Image (tube, helix red, strand yellow):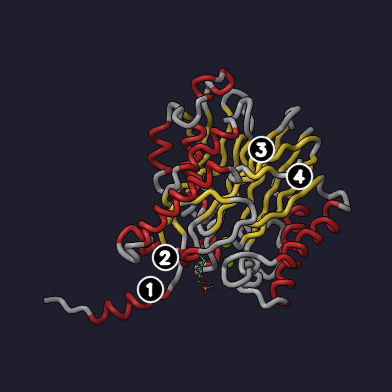
Amino acid sequence: MRTTLSVIKADVGSIGGHIVPSKAQMEAVEKYVRENGLDKGMILDFNISHTGDDIAILMSHTKGTGNEEIHKLAWDAFLAGTEVAKGQGLYGAGQDLLKDSFSGNVKGMGPAVAEFEFDERPNEPFLFFAADKTDPGAYNLPLFLAFADPMHNAGLMLSPSMKDGFKFVIMDVAYTEGDRVIELNAPEDMYDIAALLRDNQRFVVESIYSRSTGDIAAVVSTTRLHNIAGKYTGKDDPVMLVRVQGAFPATGEVLSPFNIGHYVAGFMRGSHTGPLMPVKRNSTISFFDGPPVVSCSAYCVHDGKLTEPADAFDHPYWDYIRNQISRKATEIRQQGFSGCAMLPYGELEYGGIVEKMKKLDGKFTVR
Ligand code: F6R
Ligand code: MG
Ligand code: MG
């Protein structure tokens, strides 16, 4: 069976600041998708979750990627969540719905989208990642390590089905006229892939394909809200889908690089550097509006029906990692605004500093 998995996520308001959506809001989104999507046969299955202040709608269906009906279903569900948010006086109600009316596809309208279509294997395990308080480049390093580095992916050495490596499709997210992409193959182009992926704010992995089978392996939401709105509207908070096992990395190989807690852009006011902490599903946000977090729900899909999610970061191992990453977060916060603790000028999410610098510029004298 040819199945499409679509995950569409948005921040449409939250309790107590940019922390967590309300139960009533989650229920409103769930009810909307159930009544207008599942019950009407538009989608085959769905699951609603949140990571920090972002609500994600994961859907399985047969309509392919970029489908208008599916995107509208998610958009309208987020509008239903926004109504509840307004009614409860939640903070940032409707924050990520940047356009007044839906126009065919939620891409470029605020919500983040990751979706792929494939012929279901007899057993089809996949992972759904959702990150909050960071941008899509946060997945660059973990994807590089999971799909191209035998230090994390033992299957690159041991599994005949991965011996040909993977194709990386990388997008230049600074280019706004269209999708500017490059295709590079691991292992032979590894140094070129690394040269691009080091710049998380400019070059972002959009998708990855198996070179043995040609099948799609991973897809990342590449939206940068910054580029759509031209002003601060929240960090992009990316979602990602990854197929696992068989010709793809094992689940544990994809999870492995997340034990680094690598420093990413985001954190307070989307303007700082912080370590990416793997957290449980439906986690909240706390210290310094962070730290940047990522959740991972593992599923199987069969004939378009989803299993219940297995929470991949809900395990004693990750408690140990979370403690180590808390230390990394504390350490970088000790230097406040100084140097690499805060993002470079062009990446600061608040325009206020531009005004400030203009004013100060006029006060400089040249001796
Ligand atoms: C980061 C984030 C928060 C807000 C901060 C100020 O992505 O959402 O850190 O930037 O809480 O929020 P506003 O500007 O809404 O008062
Ligand atoms: Mg928010
Ligand atoms: Mg968010």
Q: As shown in the figure, which amino acid type bears the numbered disc 2?
A: Leu
Residue 353 image label? 1
Residue labelled with disc 2: 348
Residue labelled with disc 3: 126
Residue labelled with disc 4: 60
Residue 311 image label? none
Q: What element carries label 4?
A: strand
Contact check, label 2 and label 1, Cβ < 8 Å: yes
Q: Is residue 30 above or below residue 180?
A: below
Q: Residue at x 11, y 76 (%)?
A: 367
Q: Which residue is drawn at 82% across and 54% down?
A: 37
Asked whether residue 37 is in view, the answer is: yes
| Viewer-nearest of discs 4 and 3 | 3
Percent of width and height locating residue 123 = 73, 29
Nearer-N-terminus badge (3/2): 3
Nearer-N-terminus badge (4/3): 4
Nearer-N-terminus badge (4/1): 4
Q: As shown in the figure, which amino acid type bears the numbered disc 3?
A: Phe
Q: Is mark 1 on a helix, strand or loop?
A: helix
Q: Is residue 367 left or right of residue 357?
A: left
From the image, which quarter does the N terminus lie in?
top right
Contact check, label 1 and label 3, Cβ < 8 Å: no
Q: Which residue lies furthest to the right in this view?
A: 40
Residue 49 location, quadrant: bottom right
Contact check, label 2 and label 4, Cβ < 8 Å: no
Nearer-N-terminus badge (1/3): 3
C-alpha span from label 1 to label 3: 42 Å
C-alpha span from label 2 to label 4: 36 Å
